[in-house]
Amino acid sequence: MLYSANSRSIIIANSNLEVECYNYQSMKAFTNNDIDGQKEGQAAGEKKSALQPTWTANIGEQAREMRVHFNRYLQSADIVVLGEQSFFILNEHGGKLRYQKRLSFAPSCFLTYHLKNEGDDLYVDEGPNKEREKAAIIEAAATSRDGLKTPGFMTLMGSFEGYLMVYRDTKLAWTTKLQALPIFVCTAAFQQQTGLIVTLSDAGLL
C-alpha cells in the first residue's frame, strides 16, 4: 500500500494480482456515510454499498513492492510496481500500463530516481545525433502523456540471487554481487559524499 500526494490517492495490490487506486475524497465520503447501513448492505450482497476503486490494473503477478515516482519529463507521477518476475510502470490517472519489462531474475527490492542533469537518465544509442535524440524524447514527453515510451529514470534493483543492478532508463548500466541478499536499497550522502548506495539485508546487514 502507498499514498500518492500528487493525486491524493491510495494505491494497493490485492490477491487477484491487481493494482487498485482509491481516491481519498471518495474514501472520505464513503466512511462519512452510515456505517451500519453499509455493513447491512454488504452482508446482503449489495454491490452499491462497497467502496469502488477509481481504477484497477491487472498485472498478472503478485506485487512485491510499489513506489510513486514523479517523472520530471512527463511532469506527472508514475506508479512503479515490482512484480515477481516483471517491472511495471502505470499511469497515475487511469492505471494505464505505460511500460513493462520482463526480468530474467527474481527481484527483491528497487529504487527509482533522476540524475541531476536533465537527459542524463535517458538512454539512446551512441552516435552523432545522441543529444538531438534526447531532446526529441524530452519534447515528446512534455507534449503528451504517451510521448515517453521508456521509464525515463534511473532504477536500482536488487535480486534474490544477491546482485544489485543499475539501469539507466532501459539499459543495464552495471551490476555487482553483494555480500548479502538485499531486501531494501536507497541512495544516501555521508560526510558530503553523495551518490552512495545503501542496501539492507534480511539479517540487518548494511
Image: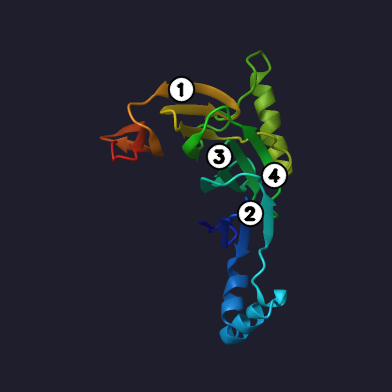
Instruction: Give the spatial CA distance, label 1 vs label 4.
Output: 27 Å
Give above or below for 15 relative to 53.
above
Q: Which residue is mark 3?
A: 84
The answer to whether mark 1 and mark 3 are in CB contact below 8 A is no
- The residue that label 2 is drawn on is 16
Report whether 109 appears left or right of 153: left
Q: Which-is-in-front pick, marks 4 and 3? A: 3
Determine whether the residue tagged by mark 3 lies in a helix, strand or loop.
Answer: loop
Q: Which residue is mark 1?
A: 175
Q: Earlier in the sequence, mark 1 or mark 4?
A: 4
Residue toward you, 16 or 123: 16
Taking the view exactly as shown, the residue that stands out farthest to the front is 44
Disc 1 from disc 2: Cα separation: 33 Å
Kind of residue indicated by mark 4:
Leu
Q: Residue at 62% of width from left, 36% of height from top?
A: 151
**Residue drawn at the location 60% of the way across and 59% of the way down:** 7
Q: Nearer the viewer, residue 124 or 34?
A: 34
Q: What crowding class fits label 1: few (fewer than 14 Cα within 10 Å), some (14-19), or many (20 or more)?
A: some
Q: From what the image shows, is residue 52 above or below residue 159?
A: below
Q: Amino acid at mark 1?
A: Thr
Closer to the camera in the image, 43 or 22: 43
The residues bearing labels 4 and 3 have C-alpha atoms spaced at a distance of 17 Å
Quadrant, the C terminus: top left
Q: CA distance from mark 2 to mark 4?
A: 17 Å
Residue 167 point in image, percent of width and height? 53, 28
Kindly indicate the quadrant of the structure image that contains residue 100.
top right
Q: Position of residue 148 (x, y in %)?
A: 69, 37
Nearer-N-terminus badge (1/3)? 3
Mark 2: amino acid: Asn
The three-letter amino acid code for the residue at tag 3 is Glu
Badge 3 local density, few (<14 within 10 Å), some, or many (20+)?
A: some
Could you say which disc has been placed on residue 143 in the image? none
